[in-house]
Amino acid sequence: MVYMVCQNKARGEEAVSKIQSSTRNQTKCSLGGTYGMTELLLPLLEKS
């Protein structure tokens, strides 16, 4: 599983594309805005 948090949307999408092409995995989730970031980071912080 790969978690990516990117400041630049275009560069993040480029990185996702490279990962997908090298792994043949087409799963993608895009979280925009503060609420989406909070929802993403809370479970990750709880695991650390």
Image (cartoon, rainbow, N blue to C red):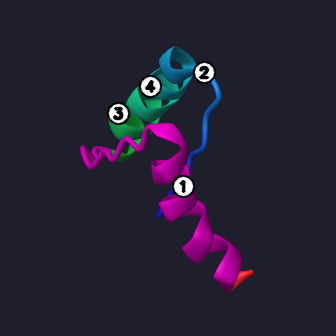
Task: First in sequence, mark 2 or 3: give its number.
Answer: 2
Residue to which mark 2 is pinned: 8
x then y, percent, for residue 9: 51, 22
- Residue occupying image coordinates x 37% and y 41%: 30
* In the displayed structure image, the side of residue 26 where residue 43 appears, left or right: right
Q: CA distance from mark 4 to mark 2?
A: 9 Å
Q: Which residue is situated farthest in the front direction here?
A: 35
Can you tell which of label 3 and label 4 is closer to the viewer? 4
Query: Which of the two labelled residues, at mark 3 and mark 4, occupies the earlier sequence position?
Result: 4
Is 5 drawn above or below residue 15 in the view shown?
Answer: below
Tag of residue 21: 3
The three-letter amino acid code for the residue at tag 1 is: Tyr
Q: Position of residue 38 (x, y in %)?
A: 56, 58
The residue that mark 1 highlights is 3
Is 16 included in the stretch rendered in magenta? Answer: no
Q: Which residues are magenta?
A: 24-46
Badge 1: how crowded within 10 Å, few (<14), some, or many (20+)? few
16 and 22: which is toward the camera: 16
Q: Residues within 10 Å of mark 2 (few under 14, many from 20)?
A: few
